[in-house]
Every structure is written in structure tokens, then in C-alpha cells.
Amino acid sequence: MNNTVVQILLIVLAPVLGGLIYGLERKVKARMQRRIGPPLLQPFYDFLKFADKRKMIVHSTHAFLGIVHFISLWFAVAVLIMGGDFILIIFLHLLSTAVIILAGFSTRSIFSHLGANRSAISILAYEPVLVLIAISAYMLTGSFDVSALYASEMPVLFKMPLAFIALLLILPVKLKKSPFDVGDAHQEVVGGVELEYSGIFYEAVYTAKWLDYIFCYLLVFLFGGANIWLGLLLVALTFIYINALDNSTARVNYKQMLRFCLWVALPIAFVNLILTMFNVL
Amino acid sequence: MPSIIVSLFVLPVIVSLLLLFLPKAVARVVTILATLVLSGISLYLYYYAGDQPIQFSVPAVVDKVVLIADFALLAYILAQGFLQRNVWVGVLAVLQAIILGYLTMYMPHGEYMQFYVDSLSLFMFILVNVVSGVIAIYSLRYIDEEKCSNFRKKYFLSTIFWFIAAMNLLSAADNLEYFYLFFKLTTIASYLFIRFRLDKESKKNALTALSMNQVGGLAILGAIAYTIFTPGYGVPTISSLLSQVPTVGVIMPFAFLAIAGLVKGAQYPFSKWLIGAMVAPTPVSALLHSSTMVKIAPFIILRISPAIQGTPVATVIICLTAFVFIAAAIGALAQDTFKKILAHSTIALLALMILMSAVGTPVAVTAALMLIFFHGLSKSMLFLNAGVMEHVFHMKQTSSMTKLGELGPYTSLIVAVGFMSLLLPPFGAFIGKWFSIETLGTVGGAVTNPVYKLIGALVLVLIACGGAVLSLLYFKVLGSMISRTGEKDKVKFEKLHPLYQGTMNFLLFSVLLCTVALPWLIPGYFAPVAADVINSGVAVGIEGFTMNIDNVKLPLIPMVAALILLPLGIIVAMFVRFKNVDRAKEYACGEKVEYNFASFYFSTEKATPYFVYAGAIFFVGILLAGYLM
């Protein structure tokens, strides 16, 4: 019972938590660059400011799809928190990505199109790895439900360390962090799909990015199993890793990203799958 | 009951003959009525046929008719090969004639039934009659716009109906000799369809289709020969073969039948005929890709799946189709013609259906059936749409479709829903794919043989990657045809001809309705058919908000939410209008640019020739595996 309350609270607060993570990230990144950085609540101040701006859209379909994107991503996060089917969660996340890609294509903006194309390519980079991790998790727990991972007594990390490494390799693609931030590379495609959103209509896409943080770090948290502290430690380490990586690397182009994910991350996930299948670890 | 089933064979033939003579207005009424009646009969049969398979024989004289028809068709093919100077077609026809003539001398006669209608056949009846009927109605208008003589227009419509008859017969045939004839009939129907436009390319592709599909015919003859000459098998009917498998243990006939199926299903290296088939008028592609021709492949594999499950033959088929799934998806990335892209994705999804049929566990078979059904609906919708694009908007290449979102918002909406329905939750095809991944994981985890475990893992990787490539493909295509500028904020659907609009609306609503009805369709429709296919029960139960199908769980709440988000969300997005909001131009760095950006192009031509070779190796592998067993 208690558990359910926590889950529902987490789901309701997911965007706020994501905002906090984003604020913290800006702070940490600034400190890594020896800057002071914005206050922790800066994302929320930005949020309030966007609401006050003049309302401008390209056309209504485009603006509305942004909102659908936010809701569907929130929903995917909710199913993940409630411990639903792993494969289904991956595809619900794909659904939300599909909606934002459609939105990107629905305008006649060059940068928006380029960004949408690149987002579609990044699906090819990370989705197979995630599916393989989900299947490995099934081999480990005998259930496709994420709740089986939450309940796993033996931390998942020790059972499938290679899956964790593969996840670490594709997380920058999902979070659009350097070196794999081709999707919304500001210097190249001016933010990609989110470019044509502004003011109050940008809020949906902006907060959806916060939800993506929650989604990705929850995937990391899964590797702690039933041990919450280990999970949180993993999340903290991953957080530092992602930001250090983002600060210290330059962007590669989309072909290099694809090649890296399919030739490095995917084989690692595959080896992990085989090891789990044969019960080696 | 048998008489009603026979009406499914006879009625389309009568309609087909009538359509040759009737004037246009009457032909329209007849086509629509025939579709309604045929769909009605197939639905009626499904509900009232009962659990027991219906077996019936036909008078002995029909045997002779079948034999004569067999030779007549072979003579026709030989004549075509001779007239058009195609050696392969001729050689294959002669070869078949010789083998058939030899086999006839030894063929046991009498003692057995020629037709066997179980729920899989009834399942096929519904798909064939309803979807093909809708396509026939659509072609009434489409063929009117075609540049050809009045007689050829009638001839086109008439061919559709005898094709339907051939498909109905094929789904019901039990005797392999009859099966061979109907198989051949569908081959010839597709040959006539593909060369309908009578230009050089059509004729060439039609001959390719004819020669490739004859390999399938040859394989069926091989199956008959093995059945007759192997002691213990006796009569060459599918049902007796299936009932004797455990005792005799020779699976060579099934390997032959599987090859016949895979050829029809255009798996590598036989993919060329299906891709070449798009030179024909679009309703033909719709017919071949959705409800008829290619669905013979999963149908045959489903039929024989209890016999081959767990054997090396099934393993080779699984490897082949897993490979084809990703190879065809990669091949599609390089294409620009809309119909070619659809053709490649058909091959990929067919591979998935065949794979699931060959796996043969309860969930796998259910997933295969769901894929067959929903793929039929979505693909016919997409192909009919491609026809509208060609005839109304004059667009064939995806790169030229950048204005479609403004000129034809309805058409672009249908494409969007069509593609998404093959890919994303909550649609039936997605659920089929999802079950496929989970059941493959389950099977891979359960086998003990390390080699099988490795194969299972590899197949899973191929499926995961292939799925991702397909989603990339669909987004790439969709992206070029949905963009609009801010000036056209108010979406006004274009007016199409009522026959176009009607058939497309029907298919769109069927996809949506069947998606909503899935919680009832799975226990009431797919699971019973699957249970009949594998000869054991498929446990379906509902616990709270979860539906359990054997060991796979289908949570209903996420599905409902996904339903609200995706199809409804996108449809609402077309109509929603934000008031009191300023409209802005797109951002272009202050430059004044012409908008001429479409999509990434991928060149995969370097790899594709090797796919054919790899496919050929697998085909040899199937025969070897069957022989060595």
C-alpha cells in the first residue's frame, strides 16, 4: 500500500523532479567549467518566464503535437515507475518520440526537419540496445515486468554488468548529450525539432525534456535491484559521468554516432544477452 | 455446411464471368453486392461452422477435371514461355508436366476427402473476401481512370474475382494435387495482373513472377512425390500428412511445402517478383500484398507448423526469415518510390509472420495471426492510398510528395495512421510484434541446447534491429509528406471520389475498430484459431486489467491510454485550432530560402545483391535439413 503511494507521488512529481535534475545539471556542468552557474531553480524561473511570452505558433497541429508528446512521455514514465512490461515501456517511449518527430516534420522549417530526421536516426542507434537489455532482464528474472527488477534481491548490476555498460554508452543519445547530441545540436540545426516552439507552447516540449531525464535515470536505477541505495549511487555516478562526458567531448556526426552504437554498444548488449542466457554470472 | 463453403468457390467465378459482359453501371452494383455477399458468407461461416473441421469430398469426375486443368495451365505457361522467348518459364513448365504426368500414374485415388476447412481456413476466408472485396470496389473507380480499352477494364475486374475464388479454394484444399492446381491458379492470376499494362517492363516483370512462382509449384510436386513414394505416408493430403508425422518422422514433404510457401511470400532470393509486381495498376499491388498472394506463405507455414515445430527445418526457416526481416528493411531505406518502399516493408513483415508461424508456440501463432490480419488491413489501406496519390495527385516518388500535406491532408492523415498502425502501440500489428519479441525471448530462454540458445539470441538481435530500421524507414517516408505552412492552419479535407473515400474510410475505421475491440478479438477470434492450428488450447484469461495469453501479459490500461494518445491524438491534432494566438513564419536564420529539403537518403545498393545469395543458401539449407532428418 505504502509502495503504491510512493509510486503515485513519484509519477505526479516526475516533471518537477526532472526539472530539479536539469537545474542541478546546469550547476554541475558550470562548476566543471569553473563557472558559478545559474541557481538550482533556474529551469523553473525559465518555465514561468516562457508562460508570460507572446503566444506564437507556426500552425495548430504542430503546437498540439508538442502537448501530445509531453503527455505520452509522462505516460511512459508512469508505466516505468509502476513496473510495467519492459518491452511495452520501450515502445511507449518510442510512441512519444514518434509524436515529436511528426511534429518536427509537420512544419516547413528546414532545421526542424533536419532535427526530426536525426531523431529518427537516433532511434535506430538506441532502440535495439534497449530491447536487448529488456530481453536480458527477462532471462535474469523470468518476467518481462520491470517490477521484477525492482524486487530483485541480487543487484541487477552484478548479474549483467555489460548491459549497464551498453546502457551508459547509449544514454547520451537518448538524453541528447555530447558527443551524441546530433538531434538538437544548437550550432548546426538550432535545436532541431524544438526550434519552432515558443512561449507557452514550448513549455510542453521543455518539460518533456525533464521527463526524459527521469526516464533515463530510472533505467539506470533499475540496475540497483531492490537495493535502493545502490540504485541511487548508480544514478549519481551516471549523472556525473554524463555531464563530464558532455563537457569534455565534441559532437560527432550522425553516421559516426550510428556506427558507434551499432558496432560497439549493440555487441556489448548482445554478449550480455548470451552470458545471461547461459547463466554465466 | 459444405454447400455454403462451395458457394464461396462458385460465386466469385460466376461474378467474374458476369463482369466480362455487364455494362459499367450494372457491374458496379454487382461488384458491391458480391463483396457484401462474400464477406457475409465468410463471417457467417466463421460464427456457425462449429469447432469441428469440415471435411468433404467432391464427385470423382472433378478429379479428372483437376488433372486436365493442371495440364492445360501448364500448357498455357509453356505457350507463354515460348511466345515471349523465356527459357526458364518454358523449362520449368515442361519439368512440372513431366513430373506431374509420372506422378499421376501412381496417385492413389478414392478413399479420401479433397477439402478440409478448419478455423484457419475460415480465418483466411474472412481476410480474403472482405479485404479483396474492398479492393475490388476501389478498383471500379481506379480502372476507369486507366488508359485502356473498355474490354480490358472489364477483364481486370473479372480477374480480381477469379483470383478471390482461387484463394478461397487454396485455403480450403486438402488434397495436394488440388492444392497444386489452386497454387498455380494464383500464380497465373498474378501473372495476368502484372502484365496488365502490356508495356515492356510489365511483360518482363510478369515473366519473372511466373518463373519464380513456378519454383513453388515444383516444390509442391516434390512434396507429392515424397508422400506417394515414402512407405507409411499413403495418401497425399495435408491432413493425413499432419496426422502421421509423429509416427513416420520424415519431414521432407513439409520442407518442400515450406519452400512453396516461402517462394510465394517473396522471401530472399525470390523477392524480385513481388517488387517487380508494382508496375501493375495499384489495386493489384494492394491485392497481392495485403489479403491474397503473399499471405499464402504464412498460411502454409501455419498449416504445417505442428509438424515442423522444433525440427531443423523450422530452425532454418526461422534463421532465414529473421535475416530477411532486417535485410528487406535495410533494402527499403534506399528506395524512393512509395510503392517500392511498401513492397519491401511487406517482405520484412511477412518474414516476421512466417518466423512466428515456424516457432509454433501458442503465443507465437497468435502473434502470427494478429500480424496477418492487421497487416492485411493496414497494407491494403496504404496501397489504396498510393493509388490515390498516383491518380489524383500524380505523385509516385516520396521526394515529390512534399506538398501532399497541403494538397491532400486526408490522404496524408491516412498514410500517417497506416504507417503508425504497423509500428506503434496500441495497434494490433504492434501487439503482434511485441508478442513476437517476448515469445522469442521465452523460447530462447527455455531451450537447453546451447546451439539453439545462440541461434535464439541472434534471431532476437536481428528482430530488434530490424524493428528499429523499419521505424526509421516509416518516419523517413512520413516526414516528406506531412508538412504544412502556417498559412494553411485550417485543415480542410480534400474531396475524393466516393468510391475512393468510402473504401479508405472503411479500412481506416476497421483498423481503429479492431484495435479498440482487441480485448474481445484476442480471446474470441485469434486465440481459438491459434488453438486449432497447434492442436492444443491457448489459455486466455483476464485478471483485473491484464489479459494473459499463455505466458504473455497484455496490460489493458496502457493500451487504452496509447489509443487515446496515438490515433485519436493525431486525428484531433489535425482539427484543433488555437485561437488568439499569433502565427509566425518558420525560422531560417534570417535567410530567405526556398524550402526544398526532404529526407536523408541511404545507399544500401552495395549490400543488397548479397542478400539474394544469402537467401539462396538458406533455401538449400531447408532442403538439406529436411533430407538429413
Image (cartoon, coloured by chain):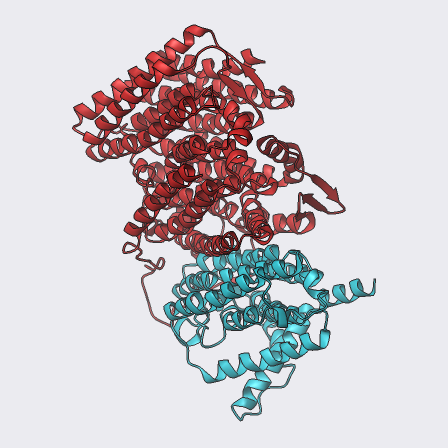
Chain colours: A cyan, B red
> Residue A178: x, y in percent?
47, 77
A182 relative position to A81: left or right: left
Quadrant of the image for the N terminus of chain B? top right
A258 relative position to A212: left or right: left
Is there any visible trace of residue A182 in the rendered image? Answer: yes
Quadrant of the image for the C terminus of chain B? top left
User: In which quarter of the view is residue B236 placed?
Assistant: top left
B607 relative position to A156: left or right: left
> Residue B18: x, y in percent?
39, 12
Give the answer, above or below, for where A57 lies relative to B361: below
Q: Residue furthest right?
A: A1
Is there any visible trace of residue A43 in the rendered image? Answer: no
Give the answer, above or below, for where B14 lies relative to B283: above
Q: Residue furthest front?
A: B231
Q: Is A157 or B198 nearer to us in this picture?
A: A157
> Residue A184: x, y in percent?
46, 70
Q: Is B223 or A269 nearer to us in this picture?
A: B223
B576 relative position to B131: left or right: right
